[in-house]
Image: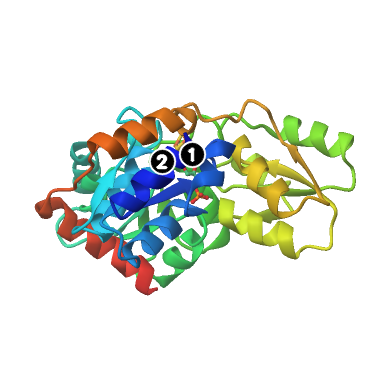
Amino acid sequence: MENEIKALLKEKNAILLAHNYQPPEIQDLADMCGDSLELSRKAAATNADIIVFCGVHFMAETASILSPDKLVLLPRSDAGCPMADMITADALEKKLVELSPPGKTVPVITYVNSPAVVKALSTICCTSANAVKVAKSLQENEILMVPDRNLARYTASQTDKKIHLWDGYCPYHDLLRANDVKQAKQAHPDAVFMAHPECRIEVLKLADIVTSTSGMLTYAARSDQKSFIVGTEVGLLYPLKKANPEKDFYPASLGMECKDMKKITMEDIKKSLRNLEGQVKVPEDIRKPALKAVSRMVEL
Ligand code: 13P
Ligand code: SF4
């Protein structure tokens, strides 16, 4: 199967990208692994004609926003993100009317885990790695941050800005509680606790470092510490251990397994590439304003 996929990738001048949460066999086969924005930016810089995105729908959309001339394939069209589905363009427009009476404009920071139509209505995008920096870069002191309430609460705790929340969340990160972390710390008293900012604020308060998936990979590689409790989706344990075989990594909770991130199989990749199935294309009238919000973040 691996060889067949490799041959198809070569024949079609395609590149295979995998998010850090994808199953091990897919990460091993991929040309590049990383977080969503990192992957899209790397893909835009290659001369491949086709991008096969092993992740979820919003990631394939971001690749399409940044690479309009490439064909973007998501091998399973039902691989979505429950948090991205917690916001729509209509609901955001209503909220903006509520927050911005005539003469007042509240800027919108939109997490990349969101639909392209929502990005198109936004002032600027952010990722889990740069949310605080993005918020600080805005002149306004009152901001709406969507769709992740936990990322917004964390950002608010790191800035002096008044941040309006959207009631969205990642069901897997949100289920981790302070008690789970305390238990994990009792079991591994010498371990460093790394937490993703999609976790609840009660969890983030217990963290030694709050960062994105790629931030955790960098931190663990550079750290002198030997053991780590990992407060994010369990798929990250594989690349962490692969890059640091001499170190120990413990999941903060085994319940943090994203069903959508595990949908794509090797068979799906082969089928998608062979038949060019699962194409994701953001229409130009949405892509242009969405690109503006993504580019503003990238420039920052
Ligand atoms: P990052 O890899 O950007 O930290 O994102 C985490 C996530 O939940 C992606 O779906
Ligand atoms: Fe969405 Fe959470 Fe799954 Fe990431 S881990 S794709 S935020 S549901």
Question: Which residue is identified by label 2?
Answer: 5
Report the front residue among 100 and 201.
201
Residue 277 in view in this figure: no
Indicate the position of residue 284 as horizontal and vertical percent values.
11, 54
Q: In this view, does 4 lie to the left or right of 274?
A: right
Residue type (three-letter) at the residue carrying disc 2: Ile
Q: In this view, does 255 lie to the left or right of 112?
A: right
Give the Cα distance between marks 2 and 1.
5 Å
The vertical placement of 115 against 138, above or below, is above
Indicate the position of residue 109 as horizontal and vertical percent values.
35, 56
Residue type (three-letter) at the residue carrying disc 1: Glu
Image quarter of the C terminus: bottom left
Q: Who's the residue at 34% across and 68% down the image?
A: 45
The vertical placement of 138 against 202, above or below, is below
The local secondary structure at tag 2 comes to helix
| Quarter of the rendering containing residue 279 | top left
The local secondary structure at tag 1 comes to helix
Task: Decide: few, some or many residues near mark 2? Use Cα within 10 Å; few <14, some 14-19, many ≥20.
Answer: some
Most extreme residue toward the left, as rendered? 285
Question: Which residue is identified by label 1?
Answer: 2
Q: Who's the residue at 33% across and 39% down the image?
A: 57
Q: Who's the residue at 69% across and 49% down the image?
A: 242
